[in-house]
Amino acid sequence: MPDQIQIRNFKLLLFCGVLPEEKVRRQPFRLDIDIEVDLVAPSETDDLTDTVNYGEVLGTLERVLEAERFELLERLAGRVVELIMENPLVSAVGVTVHKLRPPVPQNVESTGVRIRRER
C-alpha cells in the first residue's frame, strides 16, 4: 500500500443536489480522503515542507466547496480531487463523499460516491 495522509469524517454544509430545495438550502456532507504522497522524506526530516499540509488542504476545501454549488455527488468528489491534486507532491487522491440526508423516502444513513484519480 502506498504512503497516505488520511482525513476522516470531514464535515461540511454544502449546496449539492438536483431538487429545488437542495439548491436553496445547505446540506450536511462528510468526506473521507486518502492522499497518496511519498512520506519517506518527512518521516526522516520531521519537516512540514517535505509533506502535504493537511491543515492547508482542509482550509482550501472548506473555502472553495462552501462557495461553489454542485448538482451531482460525482462532481463534488471530482472537485475535491482537483483541488488536492494541485499540490505537486500528491501522486493520487481517493475521496468518498457521503450525503448525510439524502432526499429519498427509504431509511438510509447516507448515500455517496467514491472516486480515485492518479497522475
Image (spheres, grey):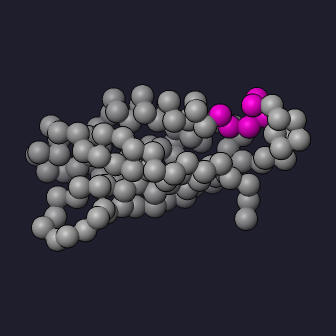
Q: Looking at the picture, how far across and down is residue 54, in whole percent?
A: 61, 37
Residue 32, above or below 59: below
Quadrant of the drawing holding the N terminus? bottom right
Q: Is residue 90 left or right of residue 66?
A: right
Q: What is the x, y in percent for residue 58? A: 51, 35
Q: Residue at x 11, y 45 (%)?
A: 21
In this view, the residue in front, 46 or 79, is 46
Q: Which image quadrant is residue 112 in?
A: bottom left
Residue at image position (46%, 57%) is 96
Residue at the spot 16% in from the left edge and 64% down from the top edge: 104
Residue 52 in the magenta stretch? The answer is yes
What is the span of residues highlighted in magenta in the rendered image? Answer: 48-53
Residue 93 visible in the current orientation = no
**Of all residues shown, which one is farthest toward the right?**
44
Q: Is residue 82 left or right of residue 104?
A: right
Where does residue 23 sit, x and y in percent of width and height?
17, 41
